Image: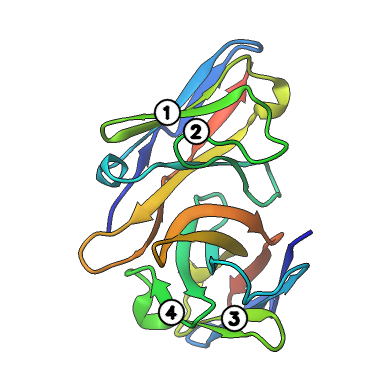
């Protein structure tokens, strides 16, 4: 059974970098034709796609966050990671990692496996 | 990037049928996926593609699409269906390749 688990600091200071890791178990992150993505949800608000990475290293980001986001993969650890720099209070959210399907090499919205999410608060 | 619009809230009487809609230009080219999210939980996929249900999703959930509008229908809503529902689809505006979510619809089962 594929499982995803987010980990990282729950509190980040304004202007610093938010760093999270998603550990995948139950299958190899390199197998299949899947993207591995990050989605966030501010308290009481909706879902926002942050970006995704393919097992070959191809990345796509939300245009509204692209200048601040980096997603990378470590296949040896079966993990992928999110870095969001220059954070503000508006980046306070539950951050989810998830697997989604690829079609023609492009990411689809079929997120079929999700982590439980981790709350990151931006505050001094 | 593209946008998807959902009604903020919808209600349905127990056992009745409810339709939750999602509008956006991307839906003319791509199918919507639908997610159910209950308080404090991660979203779960309930409908994907043209009208496919992942294993374990009851057959009272179905999806359809026409023009720029996708719909999630729950036939015979149950109390446990009370949740937030989100649509999403592919976003290929300009040179961008990604995903866009709707704002979500809170479903109340009366």
The answer to whether marks 3 and 4 mark residues whose Cβ atoms lie closer than 8 Å is no
Callout 3: few (<14), some (14-19), or many (20+) C-alpha neighbours within 10 Å?
Answer: many
Question: How far from the left and from the top, in percent, is residue A77?
Answer: 72, 86
Q: Quadrant of residue B56?
A: top right
Please indicate, yes or no, whether residue A41 appears anywhere in the rendered image: no
The quarter of the picture where the N terminus of chain B appears is bottom left
Mark 1 → mark 4, Cα distance in angstroms:
32 Å
Give the residue at mark 3: A81
Mark 2 → mark 1, Cα distance in angstroms:
6 Å
Mark 4 falls within which chain? A
Badge 2 or badge 1: first in the primary sequence: 2
Give the residue at mark 1: B64
The residue nearer to you, when weighing B96 against A96, is: B96
Mark 3 falls within which chain? A
Front disc: 3 or 2: 2
Residue in the picture at 68% in, 28% down: B58
Q: Are marks 2 and 4 on the same chain?
A: no
Mark 1 → mark 3, Cα distance in angstroms:
35 Å
The answer to whether marks 2 and 1 mark residues whose Cβ atoms lie closer than 8 Å is yes
Is B37 drawn above or below residue A14 in the view shown? above
Give the residue at mark 4: A58
Mark 2 → mark 4, Cα distance in angstroms:
29 Å
Give the residue at mark 2: B51
Mark 1 falls within which chain? B
Residue in the picture at 52% in, 18% down: B18
The quarter of the picture where the C terminus of chain B appears is top right
Callout 2: few (<14), some (14-19), or many (20+) C-alpha neighbours within 10 Å?
Answer: some
**Which type of secondary structure does the marked residue at label 1 adopt?**
strand
Left or right side of A29 for A59: left
């Amino acid at each position: 059974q594929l499982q995803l688990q987010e980990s990282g600091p729950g509190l980040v200071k304004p202007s610093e970098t938010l760093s999270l890791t998603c550990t995948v178990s139950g299958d190899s992150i390199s197998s299949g034709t899947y993207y591995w993505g990050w989605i966030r949800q501010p308290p009481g608000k909706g879902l926002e796609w942050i970006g995704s990475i393919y097992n070959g290293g191809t990345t796509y980001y939300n245009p509204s966050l692209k200048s601040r986001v980096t997603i990378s993969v470590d296949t040896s650890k079966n993990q992928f990671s999110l870095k969001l720099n220059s954070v503000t209070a508006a980046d306070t959210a539950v951050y989810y990692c998830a697997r989604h399907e690829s079609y023609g090499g492009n990411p689809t919205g079929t997120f079929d496996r999700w982590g439980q999410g981790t709350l990151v608060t931006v505050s001094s | 990037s593209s946008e998807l619009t959902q009604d903020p809230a919808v209600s349905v009487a127990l056992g009745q049928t409810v339709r939750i809609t999602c509008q956006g230009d991307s839906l003319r080219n791509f199918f919507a996926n639908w997610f159910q999210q209950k308080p404090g939980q991660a979203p779960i996929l309930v409908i994907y593609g043209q009208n496919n249900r992942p294993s374990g999703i009851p057959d009272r959930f179905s999806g359809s699409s026409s023009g720029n509008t996708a719909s999630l229908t729950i036939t015979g809503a149950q109390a446990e269906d009370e949740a937030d529902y989100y649509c999403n689809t592919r976003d290929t505006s300009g040179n961008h390749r990604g995903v866009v979510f709707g704002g979500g619809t809170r479903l109340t089962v009366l």
